[in-house]
Image: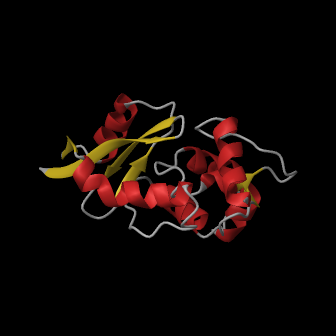
Amino acid sequence: MTKVYWTKLKINEWEIHMAATDKGLCYAGTPLETFDDLNRYITKWLPTFELIESEKEMGPYIEDMLSFFNGSSKQFTLPIDPYGTDFQKSVWQALTEIPYGQTVSYSDIANQIDKPSAVRAVGSAIGANPILIVVPCHRVIAKNGKLTGFRGGLEMKRQLLELESR
């Protein structure tokens, strides 16, 4: 049985569950999500893995996240290991290419992955992003410039965009 390490990271008023395989970060939830949400994700995509709580194993990911939040780093340096469909992974890969401090629209992402008519499917894939913040779905906004859906809530999205605008 392969191990998935996890921990709970406290950043300001947020507590975020994070998990990693030996290949990279596979989950970073929202403050609204619980250990049960993490467990459901792991059970769905990695049913033969064992979840082990370990702040030590998760230490590099914690440091990477804290560096982002304290402003000393604008990009994440550690590998990611997201699990989803091939389409979802293509959307998530496109999200990682959005520059720090910039925003794009859902249709921009659809065009980037050569699926211009799949804007709704792109929105669904973005909503299923298992690695929030690191895979920056908060940088995707409506074509008219308004903040739209975010699994962590629009207030969290606004705060993340504000952090990046400083």
Would residue 97 be found to the left or right of residue 149 on screen?
left
Q: Where is residue 141 drawn, in percent x and y?
A: 75, 51
Q: Residue furthest right?
A: 144
Give residue 63's quadrant in the image.
bottom left
Is residue 118 visible in the rendered image? The answer is: no
Is residue 109 visible in the rendered image? The answer is: yes
Q: Residue furthest left?
A: 1
Q: Is residue 62 above or below residue 155?
A: below
Q: Is residue 150 above or below residue 67?
A: above
Q: Give the colour scheme of this rendering.
A: secondary structure
Residue at image location 40% in from the left, 33% down from the top: 37
Residue at image location 47% in from the left, 51% down from the top: 131
Residue at image location 58% in from the left, 38% down from the top: 151
Q: How many marks?
A: 0
Identify the image quadrant of the C terminus: bottom right
Q: Is residue 93 above or below residue 152?
A: below
Would residue 107 be found to the left or right of residue 31 on screen?
right
Q: Which of these two is toward me, 164 or 119?
A: 164
Q: Where is residue 148 drawn, in percent x and y?
A: 74, 42
Q: Which of these two is toward me, 103 or 74?
A: 74
Q: Which of these two is toward me, 56 or 130?
A: 56
Give residue 69's quadrant in the image.
bottom right
Residue at image location 68% in from the left, 56% down from the top: 139
Would residue 69 be found to the left or right of residue 17 on screen?
right
